[in-house]
């Protein structure tokens, strides 16, 4: 419905209600309140889309402590030297100036579901009619014995963007020829399924570009298989022969406690004293979602696949990495796609906008070496209680160089596109 | 609020708007469908690696989408998206994006 239609309706409704003796001011003040916790690809997209498409009929508040968002997507390209740090920073200003989103740069500390209120770091309570919870992931540091938040200052995870990413970059650039890099890969389900393996590719690219002949990258994986495995392994063999060694549990036999002070990683197979250790632990929904009782025993939040509404609270939507999105991977593309469904359903609930059946898409691109990029993706629909893949595609091994080059151009184009879609 | 009161008011007012409902529905559908496209194809019409799709003549848009549906064009992302769209939906998108102009 257009804003002028809505205004007409409200005027007529006000007249009706005035005639009936009900209090008119109640309607005049009745702008519904949407609070969004988390300004990533899920939360910021919802804030923008609801504010823009409701023409001011919904009061939208985005709660996000950072004044500039740092994208986790493409942070591997930063590690590889394909993207500058500044290019990954995005301001929230346009959300406020162009669409009227109210920005609150504070951490949300707790959700009171009974009172429909969010408590901020300074103690302020933000009341909501509907709430979006999009906190992304938290790391389960203890999932890797010996690892901790303190150990991450020596053995970075770099799985949340920011100082960790920059620390890993400095460590990578400092590795000398003959140095060993060990990555401890995460168990499913985690943010960005091909991410660890694109990261390995970018590390190998940096070492190769520096002329290293004897450096090695060893991946200790708790999984038997991984995303785009054939494509990555083909690429490693082609571009970085002998440099990358991926070990599944049958090969390494189990990862023993890591030791940050000694900088060692041991497995049943071998003891390592690497120049760089990148530990990517298991993951779960952000704390605020878990504390509010929105997560289940998996650590992630179940949702209604037709709307992205929390399975545990009809006034709350959960999108992005924190939710259980069925066959959709945890990616920025997925979060953005889920956000558009949630924004539509929210407008339907709050201002009676017309709604349509949910449909979702995702694509993940991975850079293996300069101009050699692969992709995986699909379309998804609510089906049998989950978001189910309807059709999927993945790049093929042995593709020609021109197609891979085009896929990299597409990858860069997607980054420009999605960041414009979210932040401008 | 009175979401409930507003809903009742809306139900009553819906009669008034009945004639415009079809056109509004198409527009609302086009707007929702287009949100899928603009993750990659910038609504401002800027090219940074992915083709712009704003300001195209409607028949060109429809023809190209038809070619993706028929897998005559190769990109698997576009094939996957096009095959899900009905002819009416493609027409709605063609009208929507055709009405936009690239930003300067």
Image: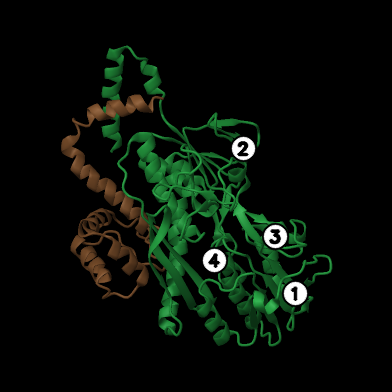
Along the polypeptide, which appears first: circle 2 or circle 3?
2
Q: Position of residue B39 (x, y in %)?
A: 40, 58
Q: Position of residue A148 (x, y in %)?
A: 75, 58
- Crowding around mark 3 (Cα neighbors within 10 Å: few <14, some 14 to 19, many 20+) is some
Whole-angstrom CA distance, mark 1 to mark 3, is 15 Å
Please, which residue is most extreme toward the right here? A262
Please, which residue is most extreme toward the front here? A384
Callout 4 and callout 1 share a chain: yes
Q: Nearer the viewer, mark 2 or mark 3?
A: 3
Q: Which residue is mark 1?
A: A267
* A140 with respect to B13 (left or right): right
Asked if the residues shown at circle 1 and circle 3 are in contact, with their CB atoms under 8 angstroms apart, the answer is no
Query: In the image, which lettered chain appears brown?
Result: B
Subunit that carries the residue with mark 2 = A
Q: Which residue is mark 3?
A: A143
Please, which residue is most extreme toward the left here? B19
């Amino acid at each position: 419905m257009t804003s002028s239609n809505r205004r007409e309706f409200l005027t007529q409704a006000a007249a009706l209600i005035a005639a009936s003796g009900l209090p008119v001011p109640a309607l005049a003040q009745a702008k519904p309140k949407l609070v969004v916790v988390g300004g990533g690809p899920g939360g910021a997209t919802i804030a923008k889309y609801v504010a823009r498409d409701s023409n001011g009929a919904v009061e939208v508040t985005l709660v996000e402590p950072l004044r500039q968002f740092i994208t986790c997507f493409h942070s591997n390209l930063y590690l590889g030297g394909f993207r500058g740090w500044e290019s990954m920073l995005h301001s929230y200003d346009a959300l406020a100036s162009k669409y009227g989103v109210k920005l609150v740069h504070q951490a949300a500390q707790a959700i009171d579901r009974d009172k429909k209120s969010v408590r901020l770091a300074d103690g302020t309570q933000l009341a909501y009619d509907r709430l979006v919870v999009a906190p992304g992931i938290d790391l389960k540091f203890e999932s890797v014995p010996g690892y901790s938040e303190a150990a991450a200052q020596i053995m970075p995870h770099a799985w949340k963007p920011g100082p960790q990413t920059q620390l890993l970059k400095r460590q990578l650039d400092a590795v000398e020829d003959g140095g060993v890099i060990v990555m401890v890969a995460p168990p499913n389900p985690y943010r960005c399924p091909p991410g660890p393996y694109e990261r390995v590719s970018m590390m190998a690219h940096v070492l190769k570009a520096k002329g290293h002949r004897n450096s090695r990258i060893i991946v200790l994986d708790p999984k038997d298989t991984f995303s785009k495995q054939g494509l990555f392994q083909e690429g490693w063999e082609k571009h970085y022969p002998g440099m990358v060694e991926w070990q599944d549990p049958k090969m390494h036999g189990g990862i023993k406690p890591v030791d940050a002070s000694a900088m060692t990683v041991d497995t049943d197979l071998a003891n390592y004293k690497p120049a760089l250790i990148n530990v990517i632990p298991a993951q779960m929904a952000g704390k605020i979602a878990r504390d509010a009782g929105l997560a289940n025993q998996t650590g992630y939040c179940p949702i209604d696949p037709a709307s992205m509404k929390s399975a545990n609270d009809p006034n709350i939507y959960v999108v992005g990495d924190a939710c259980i999105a069925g066959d959709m991977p945890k990616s920025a593309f997925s979060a953005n796609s889920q956000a558009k469904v949630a924004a539509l359903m929210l407008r339907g609930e709050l201002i009676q906008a017309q709604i349509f059946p949910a449909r979702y898409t995702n694509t993940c691109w991975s850079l293996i070496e300069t101009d050699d990029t692969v992709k995986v993706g699909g379309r998804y629909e609510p089906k049998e209680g989950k978001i189910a893949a309807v059709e999927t595609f993945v790049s093929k091994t042995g593709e020609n160089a021109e197609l891979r080059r085009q896929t990299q151009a597409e990858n860069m184009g997607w980054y420009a596109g999605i960041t414009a879609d979210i932040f401008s | 609020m009175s979401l409930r009161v507003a809903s009742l008011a809306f139900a009553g007012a819906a009669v008034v708007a009945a004639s415009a409902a079809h056109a509004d529905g198409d527009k609302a559908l086009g707007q929702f469908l287009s949100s899928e496209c603009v993750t990659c194809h910038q609504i401002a019409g800027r090219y940074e690696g992915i083709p712009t799709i704003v300001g195209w003549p409607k028949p060109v848009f429809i023809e190209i989408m038809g070619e993706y549906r028929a897998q005559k064009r190769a990109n698997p992302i576009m094939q996957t998206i096009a095959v899900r769209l009905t002819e009416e939906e493609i027409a709605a998108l063609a009208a929507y994006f055709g009405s936009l102009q690239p930003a300067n």
